[in-house]
């Protein structure tokens, strides 16, 4: 069996490539089925966020090359481009990677908690579509458990930081105090809610939530004490916004250069900060060409993120040890599961021999043959059957002068 973690993340590829390999919620059912039929995965989990797309697979004879080819084919991309931007881990390294991801040790913001929720959602999606079985059930439940331990037993969550927090820090750096700033939040998901909470702590003058579904937008706005508008109202409402932060699941840009340009004219070129936290991007990259518009993507937040990471390194070292230990425990379980399979097969084989010889002996007794002769014959045939395979193994090892194997066989047979 092969266990592989294949991915593209913020360390290996810019947002221009990451957005090409992302999966929308609507694509997942088809993608899982395609992985099963085309690659031969018995189990799979697809994790797709703004910073990473990762494919965890388990099955017979699965190769890294096959997953690379599948991802390129599925998104209509060049295989070499995917290969140059990706990473892959196998077996115990794949297990350790999954646990490091769950703990936030592989995130842009070290120790950020949001990734755990995203991984749990990816696991649930795979489970609901029938692509989780025993191995991945154990792997991901153990990953969630170690992430919980890391968060409660280390200081990795101290001074909470996330991409959302970094966005607010950027706004403070540009505007100083945010108490007079009007903010437009586009989207109503977890990231926007987190951004809104951080902004609320900064006592911004006004917040407005724009969302495709007005009811969902109202739920988020209520938590933040914000107003609600539809996406169709954004072009008219953006005029009042000093800060625009967007994070939706849209496959097409929400804000174009023309809309922002018109808004800046109405604002008499009063500066506007735009932060695009979405992958694929919500705001057209051409907005950077406009004077008085300052556009940042998730990649641009890296410098702020690095400052926030500095205080978490010691906790991260503790977390690394915990994750590695749990990965070893998982591999021990997997190996023991393999030994159980061997024992079951060996017992079934032995029982088959027993039943066959027993039936023969009973038939002979029923025919009135000599019981003593039947017992002797049964004992001889049973002994010959049980020692046949070990005898072949000993002879082969002797011919190869393989003393180590002979010694192992002696131990297994209890001859020492």
Image (tube, rainbow, N blue to C red):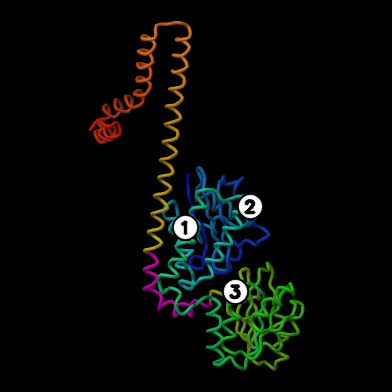
Pick the quarter of the image with the C terminus: top left
Residue drawn where x is 41% and y is 36% of the image: 343
Q: How many marks?
A: 3
Q: Which residue position is annotated with label 2?
A: 129
For the residues labelled 3 and 1, say whether their Cβ atoms are less than 8 Å apart.
no
Q: Which segment did they paint magenta?
A: 300-320
Mark closer to the chain start, 2 or 3: 2
Q: Quadrant of residue 202?
A: bottom right
The x and y percentages for residue 249 are 66, 68
Which numbered marker is on residue 142?
Answer: 1
Residue 191, placed above or below residue 7: below
Q: As drawn, is 70 to the left or to the right of 88?
A: right
The x and y percentages for residue 52 are 54, 65
- Residue to which mark 3 is pinned: 191
Q: Which one is in front, 300 or 379?
A: 379
The residue located at (37%, 69%) in the rendering is: 317
| Picture coordinates of residue 149, whole percent (x, y) | 43, 66
Query: Measured from the top left, where is residue 369 in percent x and y?
Result: 43, 6
Marks 3/1: CA–CA distance: 25 Å
Q: Nearer the viewer, mark 2 or mark 1?
A: 1
In percent of the image, x 55 and y 80: which residue is there?
167
Task: Report the side of 203 relative to 212 (left or right).
Answer: left
Q: Magenta residues: mostly which secondary structure?
A: helix
Closer to the N terminus: mark 3 or mark 1? 1
Q: Is residue 239 above or below residue 375?
A: below
Q: Nearer the viewer, mark 3 or mark 1?
A: 1
């Amino acid at each position: 069996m092969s266990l592989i973690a294949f991915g593209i993340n913020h360390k290996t590829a810019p947002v221009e490539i990451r957005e090409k390999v992302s999966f929308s919620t609507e694509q997942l059912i088809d993608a899982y089925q395609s992985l099963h039929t085309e690659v031969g995965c018995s189990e799979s989990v697809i994790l797709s966020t703004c910073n990473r797309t990762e494919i965890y697979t388990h099955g017979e004879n699965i190769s890294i090359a096959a997953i690379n080819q599948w991802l390129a084919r599925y998104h209509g991309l060049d295989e070499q481009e995917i290969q140059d931007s990706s990473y892959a881990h196998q077996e115990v390294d794949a297990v350790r990677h999954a646990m490091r991801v769950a703990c936030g040790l592989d995130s842009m913001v070290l120790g950020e908690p949001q990734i755990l929720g995203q991984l749990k959602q990816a696991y649930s999606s795979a489970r609901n579509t029938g692509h989780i079985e025993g191995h991945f059930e154990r792997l991901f439940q153990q990953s969630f458990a170690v992430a919980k331990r890391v968060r409660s037993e280390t200081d990795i969550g101290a001074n909470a930081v996330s991409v959302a927090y970094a966005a607010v820090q950027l706004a403070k750096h540009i505007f100083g105090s945010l108490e007079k700033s009007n903010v437009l939040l586009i989207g109503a998901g977890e990231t926007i809610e987190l951004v809104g909470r951080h902004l609320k702590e900064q006592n911004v003058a006004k917040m407005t939530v724009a969302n495709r579904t007005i009811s969902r937008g109202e739920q988020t706005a209520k938590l933040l004490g914000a107003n609600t508008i539809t996406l169709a109202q954004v072009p008219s409402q953006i005029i009042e916004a000093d800060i625009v932060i967007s994070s939706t699941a849209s496959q097409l840009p929400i804000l174009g250069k023309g809309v922002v340009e018109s808004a800046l004219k109405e604002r008499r070129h009063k500066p506007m900060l735009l932060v695009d936290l979405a992958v694929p991007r919500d705001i057209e990259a051409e907005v950077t060409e406009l004077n008085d518009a300052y556009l940042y993507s998730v990649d641009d937040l890296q410098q702020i993120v690095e400052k926030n990471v500095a205080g978490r390194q010691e906790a991260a070292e503790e977390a690394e040890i915990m994750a590695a230990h749990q990965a070893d425990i998982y591999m021990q379980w997997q190996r023991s599961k393999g030994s159980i399979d061997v024992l079951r097969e060996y017992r079934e084989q032995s029982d088959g021999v027993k039943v066959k010889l027993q039936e023969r002996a009973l038939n002979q007794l029923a025919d009135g043959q000599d019981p003593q002769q039947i017992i002797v014959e049964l004992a001889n045939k049973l002994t010959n059957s049980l020692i046949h395979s070990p005898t072949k193994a000993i002879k082969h090892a002797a011919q190869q002068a393989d003393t180590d194997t002979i010694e192992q066989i002696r131990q297994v047979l209890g001859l020492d």
